[in-house]
Amino acid sequence: MRIDPKDTVGVVLEDIKRGEMVCCGDITVTVQEDILMPHKIALVDIKKGDSLYKYGEIIGYATQDINKGEHVHVHNLDSEKIMKQ
């Protein structure tokens, strides 16, 4: 699910497996690893330090490079910077 055109991550609405193709609006993504609902998937390549957008809002920053189709979660996303601002 992608709510806003500037979203860089989408929400997985059902469990998806590595290698599957998923469509999120006008973006098609090849899933790079198994992702369980309701986690997030990168809809674009994201560089370390980039803002991540979900529902049109910044939800955090990438703590490492994240490739399109990879799982986005606490292992590669820092949302605490947002809370401190």
Image (cartoon, helix red, strand yellow):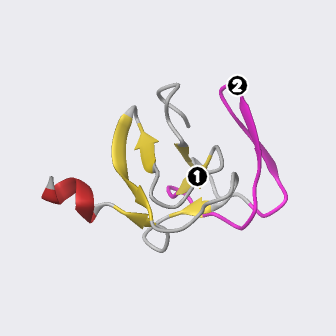
Q: Element type at marker 2? A: loop
* Residue 56 falls within the magenta-colored stretch: no
Mark 1: amino acid:
Ile
Along the viewing direction, whichever of 23 and 6 lies nearer the viewer: 6
- Residue for point 46% across, 51% down: 50
In this rendering, the answer to whether 34 lies above or below 24 is below
Residue 26: % across, % down: 70, 25
Please give the label number shown on residue 71: none
Q: Which residue is mark 1?
A: 46
Mark 2: amino acid:
Asp
- Residue for point 54% across, 41% down: 8
Q: Which residue is mark 2?
A: 26
Q: Which residues are magenta?
A: 17-39
Q: Element type at marker 1? A: loop
Q: Quadrant of residue 67?
A: bottom right
Residue 29: % across, % down: 75, 44
In this rendering, the answer to whether 20 lies above or below 77 is above
Tell which circle, 2 or 1, labels the residue nearer the N-terminal end. 2
29 on left or right of 61: right
Along the viewing direction, whichever of 27 and 18 lies nearer the viewer: 27
| Mark 2 burial class by Cα count in 10 Å: few <14, some 14-19, many 20+ | few
